[in-house]
Amino acid sequence: MSQAARKQAQQTRPAGKSSRLGQRWDWPILVVCAISALTVGLLSAANTSQHAWGLFAAAGYACATLSAARSPTPWPRTAAVIAVTGAAALPLLYLTAIGRAQMEVGVVERAAGLLFSSGTPYNSAPHAVRDFNPYLPGMALFGTPHLLFGESPFSSARLWFLAGFLGALAGAVRALTKNRTIDAHPADGTAHRITARTGALWLTACPVVALPLSIGGVDPPVIALICLALAYTDQGSAIRAGLAVGVAAALKWTAWPAIPVVIAVFAAVAGKRAAVKCALTATTIAALAILPAALVDGSASYQNVVLYPLGLGPTASSAQSPLLGHLIISLVPDGKTVTMVLIALSAVGTAISLLVRPPRTTTAAADRLALGLTLAILLSPATRIGYAIYPIVLVIWPRFTARLSISRPHLRASEPPHGRRTLEYAAQPGPMVSLGQSQLSGRSGSPSSGNVSCVCTTVCDMPLSA
C-alpha cells in the first residue's frame, strides 16, 4: 500500500480503542481515585467511617474505570453514575444503616437543640471536643429534623447535608442551562459537549466530595452554595448571587472569602449598582443569621467560632493535619502569632489583587477564591486536609460548565445610549449573542432600559463529552 493510500485509510478508519484511550484523561483519573480511596480505607482504623468508605469507593471507581475505558467518548455519563453509586450512594446507605457518622453530625444535631432552647447554638462552657460547635448558626438548621423527630435514619443531619448539597447543585445546573443549548457536534471533533448534569455527576463522584457526603461532612452544602453563587454571577443576577453566597456565609466561615470575590466580579463587569446589590444581599443574610446568637451569648460565640477553629483556645481542635500552619506552631517560637500574621497578610494580598486586577469571568473568580482559600487552609493552625474540597471544586466546576454555550464567545463591552453599560458576547462566527435574558431584551443583544447584563464565563478547551 502506498503512503498516500495508507494516510487516506487512516483518515477514514474510525479511531481504535488504543488511540482513543491515549488521548483521554477520564479513566486514568478514575484509576488514581480508586488507588486513593483504597489507600484511605487501608490506612484508616477498622470500624471507622473512612475505612468503610475507602473500600466501597475503591470498588466503585474500579468499575467506573472499566466503563469509561470501554466508552467511545470521554467522560461518559454511565461511568459517572457508576462512580457516584460506588463512592457516595452505597457507602452512605451502609453507614446510615449501621448508625455510624462523622462527629460533625452529632455536633450539628446538638446545636439545633441548643438554638431552639437557648437562642444560641453554642455551649457556654465547652470542655471536651464534642462540646464545641465551630460552625455558624445557619448550620444548626440541618439538625432541626433530628430535634423534631428524634433518632431516625431520615432525620439524621447527614442526610440533610446531602439534601442541601444536591439542592444547591441542582440550582446551579438549572441556572447554567437556562436559555442555553448544547452543541452536539463541536468543532474540536469530540462527539458531544459535556452537559451540566453530567458535570454535576462527575463533581459528586470526586473523592473530596464523595467522602464527606458519605460520612457526614458539613462542607459539601457550603461549596455547592458557592457554586450556585458563581452560576448566578455567570447569569448576571446580582441579588440571587448575593443570596446564595450569603446563605453559604451563614453556615461556615470558609464561605466568607467568596463574598468579596463575587462582588469584585460584578463591580468590574456589571458596574457599581450590581456590586452594591450583591453586597447588601449577601451581608444582610449573613448578619441576620450570625448576629442574634452573638447578642445572646457573645462569649460562647467567640469561643466556639473563633478561638476553637483557629486552635487558639485551651482545648485543641480535632482538625489537626500536618500542614504548614500546624508545623509552624510546632516548630517556631510564638508560632500561633506567626500564623495569624501570615493569614492576615495573605488576606490583605488577596483583597489588593481584587482591587488592582479584579476577575472578569466566573472561572477567574473561582481561581482567585481557590487561591485565597488554599493559603488560609495551609496557614491555619487547625485545619483538615479534607478542606481541599474547596479549592479542588472551585478549579474543576467552572471549567466543566464553561462548555455550555453553543459557540466560543468572547466578552465585549458596548456603550448603548444614555450611558447605560451592557456586556455582551461576540460569538465567532455569527451575530452578537447576549445572555442574562432577565436583564436584556431578546432583540440582537440590545439592552432593555436601565438594566445591566453581566455574563462572565470562559470556554475551556478540554475535550469532554455528555
Image (tube, rainbow, N blue to C red):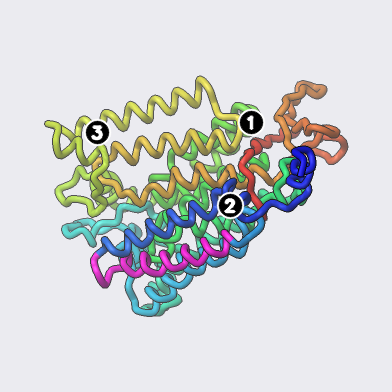
**Is residue 132 left or right of 395 when viewed as pictured?**
left
Question: Tag 2: Cα neighbours inside 10 Å, few (<14), some, or many (≥20)?
Answer: many
Q: Earlier in the sequence, mark 1 or mark 2?
A: 2
Q: Please give the name of the residue rendered at 62% of the width and 51% of the height, measured from the top-left corner.
A: 20
Question: Tag 1: Cα neighbours inside 10 Å, few (<14), some, or many (≥20)?
Answer: few
**Residue farthest left in this picture:** 333
Q: Which residues are magenta?
A: 45-69
The reply to whether residue 118 is in sight is no
Instruction: Give the residue at mark 2.
Output: 21
Instruction: Give the residue at mark 1.
Output: 273
Q: Are marks 3 and 1 in contact (CB under 8 Å)?
A: no
* Amino acid under disc 3: Thr
Q: Earlier in the sequence, mark 3 or mark 1?
A: 1
Of 378 and 464, the residue lying toward us: 464
**Is residue 333 left or right of 398 when viewed as pictured?**
left
Magenta region, main secondary structure: helix
Quadrant in which residue 81 is drawn: bottom right
Q: Give the mark toward the camera: 3 or 1.
A: 3
**Residue farthest front in this picture:** 1
* Amino acid under disc 2: Leu
Q: Please give the name of the residue rendered at 63% of the width and 60% of the height, measured from the top-left corner.
A: 71
**Residue farthest right in this picture:** 443
Q: Are marks 3 and 2 in contact (CB under 8 Å)?
A: no
Q: Position of residue 147 (x, y in %)?
A: 38, 72
Q: Is residue 68 magenta?
A: yes
* CA distance separating discs 3 and 2: 45 Å
Disc 3 is placed on an element classified as helix
Q: Please give the name of the residue rendered at 26% of the width and 63% of the height, measured from the top-left corner.
A: 44
Q: Position of residue 225 (x, y in %)?
A: 52, 51
